[in-house]
Image: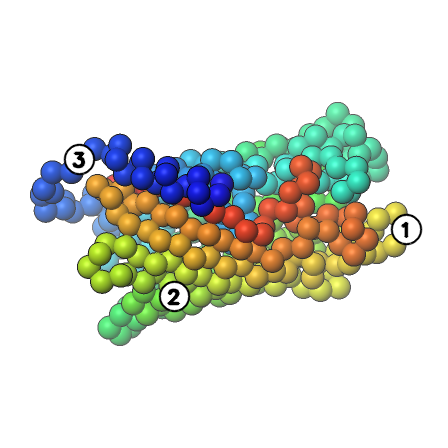
């Protein structure tokens, strides 16, 4: 979606939202066993995670529920549609085959008549956030990414479910976070335990205007000299898991409009499409598209 297409849509959304009357004082959120219960629902032009489209540029619907205790403990769950896993190329660039229907690739890695399906991402995460000084917070916890589905024909891939531990430091509108995978694999990549992600995110309020500037930079690091079998093209090994490492960036604007938060952001990820032989794919899907690179995304979120 190009910026010229998104800006008229943003103006239309603002005009269509219902008029807002003076709001009464906000009610306290419902509670469960001492935890405050809140949530949100989001519509987006696509789902971007760490600079990568999870829906091949197509729209997304998401929901999140959060339980937060006054002592700082929290537990959350979120849900979103995805297509990235089965969109992956189980073949090579010159003979693409979606991982959602890999039977044409043939034995021994893939078995005729068996398929994979993964259309939903379900996340569970929780931890402890400590406000140890004015405007300063320390955040520690675990994140579990789950992808309910069918995995009967994975071949060179693995089940994408992944567990991360994370440690974050926040100050006012800035946060620095380090995450490391503690499961055996990372998002379906074989032999990829220990993959790490570090990111700095800013949400800078523009005075009293109600606008917020969103900025972000992150880097994903996979271990090198691992998983050479994936990069074997039939005659030579063309790389290793280090090819999956990349950096990603985001710059955007957000504003609350009549009870809805509307955000427009541009992202860029310097992901490699193919390995050195220009045939084994890295971040190029079965449709021939690099799921990183430059993208523009519009989201509309309603908190409750």
SS at badge 3: loop
Q: Position of residue 10 (x, y in %)?
A: 34, 40
Q: Earlier in the sequence, mark 1 or mark 2?
A: 2
Query: From the viewer's perspective, is residue 54 above or below residue 266?
Result: above
Which quadrant of the structure image shows residue 131? Answer: bottom left
Asked whether 237 or 189 is in front, the reply is: 237
Whole-number angstrom distance, CA of label 1 to CA of label 2: 46 Å
Mark 2: few/some/many CA within 10 Å (<14, 14-19, 20+) = some
Q: Earlier in the sequence, mark 3 or mark 1?
A: 3
* Residue on which disc 3 sits: 19
In the displayed image of the protein, which residue is found farthest to the front? 4
Res. 3 mark: none
Q: Position of residue 15 (x, y in %)?
A: 26, 35
SS at badge 1: loop
Query: From the viewer's perspective, is residue 82 above or below residue 71?
Result: above
In the displayed image of the protein, which residue is found farthest to the bottom? 133
């Amino acid at each position: 979606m190009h910026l010229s297409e998104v800006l008229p849509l943003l103006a239309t959304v603002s005009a269509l939202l219902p008029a807002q009357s003076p709001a009464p004082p906000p009610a306290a959120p419902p509670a469960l066993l001492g935890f405050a219960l809140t949530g949100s629902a989001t519509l987006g032009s696509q789902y971007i995670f760490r600079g990568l489209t999870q829906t091949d540029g197509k729209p997304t619907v998401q929901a999140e529920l959060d339980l937060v205790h006054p002592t700082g403990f929290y537990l959350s769950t979120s849900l979103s549609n995805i297509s990235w896993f089965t969109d992956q190329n189980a073949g090579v660039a010159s003979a693409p085959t979606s991982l959602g229907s890999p039977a044409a690739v043939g034995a021994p890695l893939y078995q005729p008549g068996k398929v994979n399906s993964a259309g939903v991402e379900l996340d569970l995460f929780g931890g402890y956030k400590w406000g140890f000084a004015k405007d300063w917070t320390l955040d520690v916890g675990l994140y579990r990414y789950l992808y309910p589905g069918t995995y009967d024909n994975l071949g060179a891939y693995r089940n994408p479910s992944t567990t991360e531990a994370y440690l974050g430091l926040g100050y006012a509108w800035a946060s620095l976070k380090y995450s490391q995978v503690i499961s055996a694999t990372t998002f379906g990549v074989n032999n990829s335990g220990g993959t790490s992600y570090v990111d700095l995110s800013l949400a800078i309020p523009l005075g009293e205007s109600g606008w917020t500037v969103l900025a972000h930079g992150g880097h994903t690091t996979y271990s090198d000299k691992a998983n050479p079998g994936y990069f074997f093209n039939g005659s030579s090994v063309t790389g290793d898991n280090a090819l999956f490492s990349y950096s990603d960036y985001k710059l955007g604007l957000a504003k609350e409009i009549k009870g809805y938060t509307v955000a427009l952001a541009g992202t860029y990820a310097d992901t490699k499409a193919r390995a050195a032989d220009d045939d084994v794919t890295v971040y190029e899907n079965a449709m021939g598209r690099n799921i990183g690179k430059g993208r523009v995304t519009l989201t509309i979120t309603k908190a409750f």
